[in-house]
């Protein structure tokens, strides 16, 4: 009998354990077991509403019944019918002793939402301007001047759809903040002054030495009249022994020499560098076989001659090709990183039909200072080549050659130069008040509980 | 002695019975808890998997517009961040509708067509099916899923007067509420029914706004007959929510049409085919000719349509069926932008028609349903995100279920 009683005691104890376990082990409601991720839905809703900055505008116009009403309709329209919301706007400031101060809210939830999730989304007033101060390229070494060729007496090629003048303006807007002095070269006479190591702007900070020169004329390069046959510098521009029609190859050699002497960074924005020389006056009756007057073809010999000059080699007429059509090309990872840093976003995918061969590296004592595009086989679709004389570690002239097909995207040029020089950006400290608001969207399911 | 033995036996029987009952009771609680836990894991998996699909562009990132083999699945537009999806990758997901066979190329086409007057037929060889995507996501044999993309804004067209003038009442609705007081811009494409062999069209543009109930009434005196062919494309916007809808009107007795089939995403080529030549078996030969005029338009930033010149000889031409020797299809290359491919055509019996094809899923706000069938599954969890395709607002919903099986209890 006593054993039966003991067993009954055991049953009572286990029953107690079962009851206690059932009491404490409360299972969640079915809705809580596999819920919709309301937090993500809330966040993506806010993102959608702000896709054209409408939410940002409305958050600062809580007194504007129309704007606020539109936001309410859009919010109701974008959420599933079984989802209720409460959207609250807070002003972000520390003026009243607390960081977040309630501004206004809208809701379609008649009663308390028992189970809900929230997302926060910070918006800024459209009145806010975020400034940055760029480091000036070469400011620690006396400053680098940016020269943009905008010669009114020359014509461009492979800049179809643009004029050199419009490209010059775009480049000025894009790059001038990064240089101590930016000078637009208005005609070939001013270009000749530069070649002669003379400043042209009158500004005390202009420096011909170590300058960056951007040729906005595409495959064509402006040529001062003095280098024309019969003029005082014809021996530096005209090669009587070259095949007829290609005699001005030698001017490219002179440019190469100049780039080396002054340690310039010469920038070719598109296509084959130095494929034509241009001067509307002296070549007024010559055209490039495509109906553009004022230019003479130098063909592939132009690039060869430039590189000879850059490498301080004796000028010889050489027409061996040095570029290839490599088709689709992509920005290097490093360049893509700089797109974010400088906020310049050209397409990562470009087409290169004039990618320079690696063979020029050895032939002309060049090394690659920065690869803008990933090399394709033995060719570089876009790169900055540094010249270092044999046995020297000093850079004496550079060439940025973007062998892309027409038409040029000057953002690629700007990004290439900035990626090479890497000037830092100093963001302005942002201390304005009343210009940031926090939007909180709380979502709940109807009937949840 | 005997009473002790009886006591022993009785107590043992009671003890075993009690233990059996308690084990049953405890195990029921435990099974319910385990099932809940599994459902909760499935829910978390759904959310993760949906974000995994929507927040990466896949590998290679341009797989939506290239013939390169896909090795990683993702739907994000590679040129953007967050929940902005590529219009082209979505077009490459095989439809759950029955495939269409085209004998001339001996190819099956996944049928993503949405409604009358529009087509979206993608070669099955260029479409990714459920099985492939499951493998790429690493859930093959483990989980089943169905991905649904639904435009947030829907348009319902109601003709209150069919002609002289045509009056269309458009109901613009969001998912949970009518799109009240929203901006509306529209383009009515009217097919010119003149003597021209290759029918061109004129576009009537305008802007308006919905009323408090999301309704807008559009009146077109240019439509003088119900048998006129036209397409109405309407765009609406309210605080970041953007939607596009369309309505195509062709003569009710029109039997021959031009059907565009996507040929290659990489080369951006589209085959224009004669409707009689589609299907297996194709229609019995009976000579029929369609003269077409193909064009391409993109949606501009001010929400109007801008035509892009195709500059190809094949942009106008004839499609003959049943003649034996003449081609019943032709190929056209379209630009690489999202846009709407418009084909106006005229049959040899003098009937005119128009068909639209989106180049990029968002261009005409086509919906998409991709994956397995959740019907009959034991427990299906769903999750939802707001996304944009092109600039059009969509809702992406993922349904997920476990394929490894466990019994539902509790």
Image: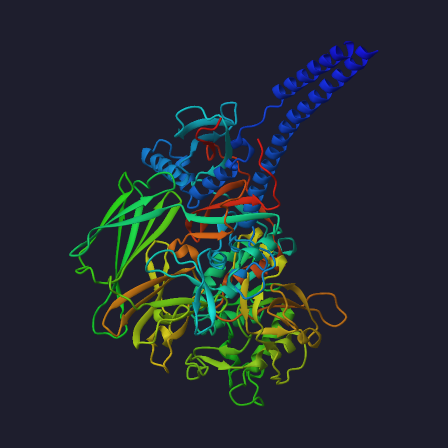
Q: Quadrant of residue A418?
A: bottom right
Q: Classify residue A91 as left or right of residue B184.
A: right
The residue closer to the viewer here, B327 or B333, is B327
Q: Quadrant of residue A55?
A: top left
Position of B244 relative to A57 (above/below): below
Q: Position of residue A70 (x, y in %)?
A: 34, 38
The residue closer to the viewer here, A31 or B285, is B285
Q: Residue, x 35% and y 31% (percent of image)?
A: A63
Position of A213 relative to B373 (above/below): below
Q: Quadrant of residue B336?
A: bottom left
Q: Position of residue A162 (x, y in %)?
A: 43, 68
Q: Position of residue A49 (x, y in %)?
A: 42, 42
The residue closer to the viewer here, B17 or A301, is B17
Badge count:
0
Position of A160 relative to A109 (above/below): below
Q: Quadrant of the N terminus of chain A?
A: top right
State whether residue A368 appears in this view. Answer: yes
The residue closer to the viewer here, B404 or B147, is B404
State whether residue A201 appears in this view. Answer: no
Q: Classify residue A218 as left or right of residue A303.
A: left
Q: Position of residue A306 (x, y in %)?
A: 61, 76
Q: Residue furthest front?
A: B2
Colour logic: rainbow
């Amino acid at each position: 009998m006593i054993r039966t009683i003991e067993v009954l005691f055991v049953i009572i104890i286990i029953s107690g354990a079962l009851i206690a376990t059932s009491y404490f082990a409360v299972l969640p409601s079915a809705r809580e077991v596999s819920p919709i991720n309301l937090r993500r839905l809330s966040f993506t809703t806010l993102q959608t509403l702000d896709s054209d900055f409408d939410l940002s505008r409305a958050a600062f116009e809580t007194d504007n019944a129309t704007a606020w009403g539109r936001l309410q309709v859009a919010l109701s329209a974008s959420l599933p019918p079984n989802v209720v919301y409460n959207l609250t706007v807070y002003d972000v400031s520390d003026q009243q002793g607390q960081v977040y101060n309630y501004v206004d809210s809208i809701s379609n939830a008649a009663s308390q939402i028992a189970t809900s999730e929230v997302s926060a989304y910070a918006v800024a007033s459209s009145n806010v301007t975020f400034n940055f101060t760029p480091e000036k390229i070469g400011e620690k070494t006396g400053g680098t001047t940016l020269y943009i060729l905008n010669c009114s007496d020359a014509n461009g090629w492979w800049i179809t759809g643009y004029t050199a003048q419009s490209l010059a303006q775009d480049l000025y807007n894009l790059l001038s903040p990064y240089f101590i002095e930016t000078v637009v070269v208005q005609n070939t006479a001013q270009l000749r002054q530069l070649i002669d190591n003379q400043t042209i702007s009158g500004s005390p900070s202009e420096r011909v030495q170590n300058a960056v020169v951007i040729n906005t004329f595409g495959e064509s390069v402006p040529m001062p009249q003095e280098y024309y046959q019969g003029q005082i510098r014809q021996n530096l521009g005209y090669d009587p022994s070259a095949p007829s029609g290609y005699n001005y190859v030698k001017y490219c050699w002179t440019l190469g020499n100049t780039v080396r002497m002054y340690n310039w960074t010469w920038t070719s924005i598109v296509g084959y560098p130095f494929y034509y020389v241009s001067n509307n006056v002296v070549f007024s009756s010559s055209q490039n076989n495509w109906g553009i007057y004022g230019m003479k073809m130098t063909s592939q010999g132009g690039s060869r001659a430039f590189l000879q000059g850059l490498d301080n080699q004796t000028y010889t007429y050489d027409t061996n090709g040095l570029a290839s059509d490599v088709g689709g090309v992509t920005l290097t990872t490093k360049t893509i990183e700089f797109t974010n840093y400088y906020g310049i976003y050209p397409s990562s995918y470009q087409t290169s039909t004039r990618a320079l061969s690696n063979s020029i590296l050895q032939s002309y004592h060049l090394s690659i200072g920065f690869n803008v595009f990933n090399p394709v086989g033995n060719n570089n679709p876009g790169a900055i080549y540094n010249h270092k004389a044999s046995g020297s570690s000093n850079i004496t002239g550079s060439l940025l050659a973007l062998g892309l097909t027409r038409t040029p995207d000057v953002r690629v040029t700007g990004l290439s130069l900035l990626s090479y020089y890497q000037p830092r950006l100093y963001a302005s400290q942002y201390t304005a008040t009343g210009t940031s608001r926090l939007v909180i969207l709380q979502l709940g399911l109807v009937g949840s509980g | 002695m005997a009473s002790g033995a009886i006591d022993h036996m009785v107590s043992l029987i009671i003890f075993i019975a009690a233990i059996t009952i308690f084990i049953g009771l405890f195990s029921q609680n435990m099974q319910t808890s385990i099932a809940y836990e599994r459902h909760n894991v499935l829910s978390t998996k759904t959310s993760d998997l949906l974000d995994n699909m929507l927040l990466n562009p896949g590998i290679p990132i341009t797989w939506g517009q290239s013939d390169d083999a896909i090795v990683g699945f993702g739907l994000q537009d590679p040129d953007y961040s967050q929940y902005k999806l590529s219009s082209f990758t979505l077009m490459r997901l095989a439809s759950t509708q029955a495939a269409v066979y085209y004998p001339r190329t001996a190819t099956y086409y996944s049928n993503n067509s949405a409604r009358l007057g529009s087509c979206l037929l993608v070669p099955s060889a260029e479409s990714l099916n459920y099985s492939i995507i499951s493998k790429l996501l690493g859930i093959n044999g483990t989980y089943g899923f169905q991905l649904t993309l639904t435009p947030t804004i829907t348009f319902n067209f109601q003709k209150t007067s069919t002609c002289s003038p045509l009056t269309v009442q458009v109901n613009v609705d969001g998912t949970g509420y009518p799109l009240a007081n929203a901006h509306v811009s529209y383009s009515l494409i009217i097919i010119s029914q003149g003597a021209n062999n290759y029918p061109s069209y004129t576009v009537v543009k305008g802007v308006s706004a919905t009323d408090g109930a999301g309704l807008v009434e559009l009146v077109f005196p240019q439509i003088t007959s119900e048998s006129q062919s036209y397409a109405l494309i309407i765009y609406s916007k309210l605080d970041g929510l953007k939607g596009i809808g369309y309505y195509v009107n062709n003569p009710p007795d029109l039997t021959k049409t031009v059907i565009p089939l996507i040929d290659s995403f990489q080369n951006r080529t589209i085959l224009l085919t004669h409707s009689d030549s589609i299907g297996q078996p194709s229609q019995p030969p009976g000579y029929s000719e369609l003269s077409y005029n193909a064009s391409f338009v993109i949606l501009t930033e001010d929400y109007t349509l801008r035509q892009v010149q195709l500059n190809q000889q094949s942009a106008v031409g004839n499609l003959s069926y049943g003649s034996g020797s003449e081609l019943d299809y032709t190929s056209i290359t379209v630009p690489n932008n999202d846009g709407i491919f418009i084909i106006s055509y005229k049959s040899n019996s003098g009937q005119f028609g128009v068909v639209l094809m989106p180049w990029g899923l968002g261009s005409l706000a086509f919906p998409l349903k991709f994956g397995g069938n959740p019907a009959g599954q034991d427990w299906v969890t769903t999750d939802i995100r707001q996304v944009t395709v092109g600039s059009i607002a969509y809702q992406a919903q993922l349904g997920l279920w476990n394929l490894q099986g466990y019994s539902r209890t509790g």
